[in-house]
Image (spheres, rainbow, N blue to C red):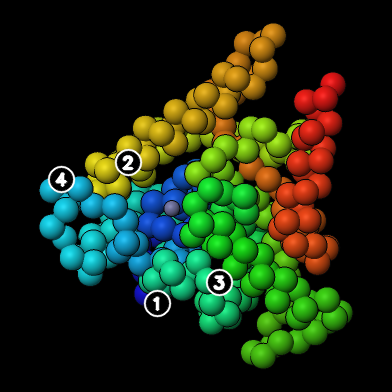
């Protein structure tokens, strides 16, 4: 694990935490959080679970070894953290397979880090229904870690090791990447307005040269946000310039012990009613 502090880090209190699977996902799922954390009102921290060495490599990147790819992606991620003035960047550097099998040691490591971020405003995580298995697993790991922490603050006035009380985040928002969330019924939808953050998005995403070279994530993520805004309402002019769809998991994570599949079934049941109409 490496804890990197950008040279121009925003040192104010952390209010937004972004927990992503790969080096470049955090800038997609946490764009709004990064945008909201550029001033003295509060900062953002990002935690990346994998080392990113297993990504597809073509063209000029085809000859890079696993370790060279890891190093290149780390540099790209650190550059983005400078642009976004992150308070800090945690690079946990796990193998994708260990994240996919939801290793309990990763959950414990995350729980340990999360303890330092008591009572923050928002945690942005991956959508638990994401099509990418590593993203899906990353989402579940965060949910497990937050529920583990819950055991410590459920008891009133509990004083943990070090004498620090942990308070839960005010909001936990899961955000679309591989597969959109536009289909989910309104009750579950959470609109993350990125209208003012597009210029920042360009600067952040342009740091991930190796990833955009192979997959054009910079263009694709922006295009989705604009498409969401256009196809939001058919009878009015656009309300937003751009936005991402999220799923508000605050209640699900903090106040229930339901599994992801229970939540999915609940949502699909409601979704089927909307198309029967
Ligand atoms: Zn990813």
Q: Position of residue 119 (x, y in %)?
A: 69, 65
Quarter residue 116 falls in: bottom right
Quadrant where the N terminus lies? bottom left
Q: Are marks 4 and 2 in contact (CB under 8 Å)?
A: no
Task: Indicate left or right for 200 with 186 as reference.
Answer: left
SS at circle 2:
helix
Q: Which residue carries the number 3 mark?
A: 102
Q: Earlier in the sequence, mark 4 or mark 3?
A: 4
Q: Earlier in the sequence, mark 2 or mark 3?
A: 3
Quarter residue 114 falls in: bottom right
Please, is residue 144 above or below residue 120 in the view? below
Label 1 vs label 2, nearer the camera: 2
Neighbours of disc 2 within 10 Å: few (<14), some (14-19), many (20+): few
Q: Earlier in the sequence, mark 4 or mark 2?
A: 4
Task: Indicate left or right for 241 with 262 as reference.
Answer: left
Q: Which residue carries the number 1 mark?
A: 1
Is residue 222 visible in this depiction of the protein? Answer: yes
Task: Indicate left or right for 243 with 76 as reference.
Answer: right
Q: Which residue carries the number 4 mark?
A: 59
Q: Are marks 3 and 1 in contact (CB under 8 Å)?
A: no
């Amino acid at each position: 694990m490496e804890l990197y502090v950008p040279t121009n880090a925003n040192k104010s209190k952390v209010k937004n935490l972004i927990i992503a699977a790969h080096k470049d996902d955090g800038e997609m799922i946490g764009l709004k959080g990064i945008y909201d954390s550029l001033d003295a009102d509060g900062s953002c921290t990002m935690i990346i679970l994998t080392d990113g060495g297993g990504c597809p490599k073509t063209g000029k990147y085809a000859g890079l070894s696993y370790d060279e790819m890891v190093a290149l992606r780390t540099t790209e991620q650190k550059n983005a953290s400078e642009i976004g003035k992150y308070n800090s960047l945690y690079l946990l550097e796990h193998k994708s397979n260990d994240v996919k099998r939801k290793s309990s040691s990763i959950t414990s490591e995350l729980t340990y880090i999360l303890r330092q971020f008591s009572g923050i405003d928002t945690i942005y995580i991956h959508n638990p229904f994401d099509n990418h298995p590593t993203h899906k697993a990353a989402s579940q790991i965060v949910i497990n870690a937050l529920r583990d922490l819950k055991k410590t603050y459920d008891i009133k006035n509990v004083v943990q090791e070090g004498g620090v009380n942990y308070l839960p985040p005010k909001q936990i928002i899961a955000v679309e990447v591989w597969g959109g969330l536009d289909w989910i019924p309104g009750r579950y939808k959470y609109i993350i307005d990125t209208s003012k953050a597009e210029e920042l998005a360009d600067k952040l995403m342009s740091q991930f040269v190796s990833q955009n070279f192979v997959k054009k994530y910079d263009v694709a993520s922006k295009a989705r946000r604009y498409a969401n805004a256009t196809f939001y309402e058919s009878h009015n002019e656009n309300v937003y310039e751009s936005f991402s769809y999220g799923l508000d998991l605050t209640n699900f994570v903090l106040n229930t012990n339901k599994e992801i599949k229970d939540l999915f079934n609940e949502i699909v049941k409601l979704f089927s009613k909307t198309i029967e109409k």
